[in-house]
Image (spheres, grey):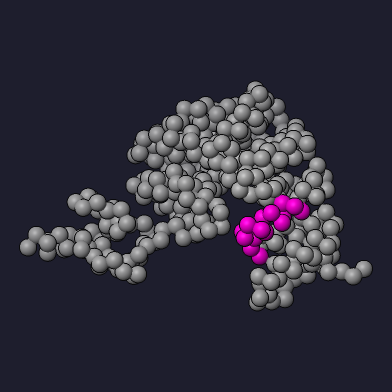
Amino acid sequence: MRTNLTKLLVLVLACLGVGFSVQAQAPGAAPAKRYPWDVRPLKCFLPDAIPSGQCQSDDWPNYGETKRRVDRLFVEPDFDLIERAENELGYSEKQFASGYYHFDAWFLSLDQMLKYESQPLYQVVSGWGKAKGEGGYVKLAEALLRYGEGWQAIQGYSNTVTPEAKNIYRRKLREANQILDSASDRLKRTGPWHVVKLRVAYQLPELKGSREELLAAAADLWPEYVKIYTAAMEFSLPAYGGSYEQVDKIARFAVERTKAKWGTSWYAIVYQQVARFVCQCTLTDSEVDWDLMKRAFRDYEARGRATESVYRAYADLACVMRDRPEARRLLEQADKLDTDRSPGRPDPCREFAFSTT
């Protein structure tokens, strides 16, 4: 009788959107809420459910889908589910097949949402802290809100930033830094905490003396987390008072921290990320060592991680540097991986690479 009542209770809970976590449910534990995308059959949540392919779940299948699912959790906030995702992603050391860390998909969602002022987002972060305490990622969220306020102050419609706007910008970055410093030791060990800390340190003049130490500490913990290097590279650009020599120094530092496993690969990895997502400039403006860059391409290829999109991204760099043989070689490698390539819009890089004139 008790078994039948238990099954009935579980079915009722499942109908209400609550279910047992097949992967981590301890005997006798309270049922865990289901993520909103979890559409497995109700039978999968019975205490004596027989594991089957139909009942297996993969909440975080790849980087892009994971990021979209985290977005959904904050648009439809349920702090129990946010806490669960925080533990499964934010503190994870796992990597997707692409090489990106699980925690980076979690961080990207927070980072993109919280850099813009929005009253609903303030309410979500406030409610998160009240519901789950200040010991976790809510501190990073609070710091990102202050960081976003600072940047919003200097991004207006005028080309001239007023002294008042600059004061707000620096004041808010200092507030973000104080929040970061007040975070728990657990959060301070995460890759995202180090990225935001580096962003702030590379912008506040009074933290200039701590930058190299912070970068080294981040690389000690997360040598294969590309954003720790690109954060330092971004705010070492001339637009922020730095120089291309400083940018190249950080790229070479990334190589030193990863060379045992990757050879010179990371010279290409970090420069490609900066050129594609960060810098309003080209490699021809920089102090890049093109011979080292080409060696980095080959080291990355030799480790079996190059995909079609990677070959095309590196071919774009070769086209910028007007290196026709290298651009052609990389596009030929990309084409080998794209056996169903249909005609598309004209590609200036392809036309340059395969031109006979």
Q: Is residue 247 left or right of residue 121?
A: right
Q: Quadrant of residue 211?
A: top right
Residue at the spot 63% in from the left edge and 40% down from the top edge: 257
Which contiguous range is marked in magenta?
Answer: 294-308
Where is residue 186 drawn, in percent x and y?
A: 43, 35
- Prevalent SS, magenta region: helix
Q: Quadrant of residue 338?
A: bottom right
Q: Position of residue 127 (x, y in %)?
A: 38, 40
**Is 201 located above or below residue 324 in the figure?**
above
* Left or right relative to 34: residue 67: right
Identity of the residue furthest to the front in this view:
260
- In the rendered view, tell whether residue 231 sits above or below residue 208: below
Can residue 167 be seen here? The reply is no
Q: Is residue 345 found inside the magenta-colored segment of the image?
A: no
Q: Nearer the viewer, residue 202 or 267?
A: 267
For the N terminus, the image quarter is bottom left
Please provide percent x and percent y for residue 259.
Answer: 65, 45
**Looking at the rendering, in which quadrant would you find the C terminus?**
bottom right
Residue at figure coordinates x 72%, y 51% from the top left:
296
**Where is residue 234 shown, x and y percent of the image?**
69, 40
Residue 244 visible to an observer of this rendering: yes
Left or right: 17 as drawn, with respect to 355: left
| Residue 161 shown left or right of residue 55 in the figure | right
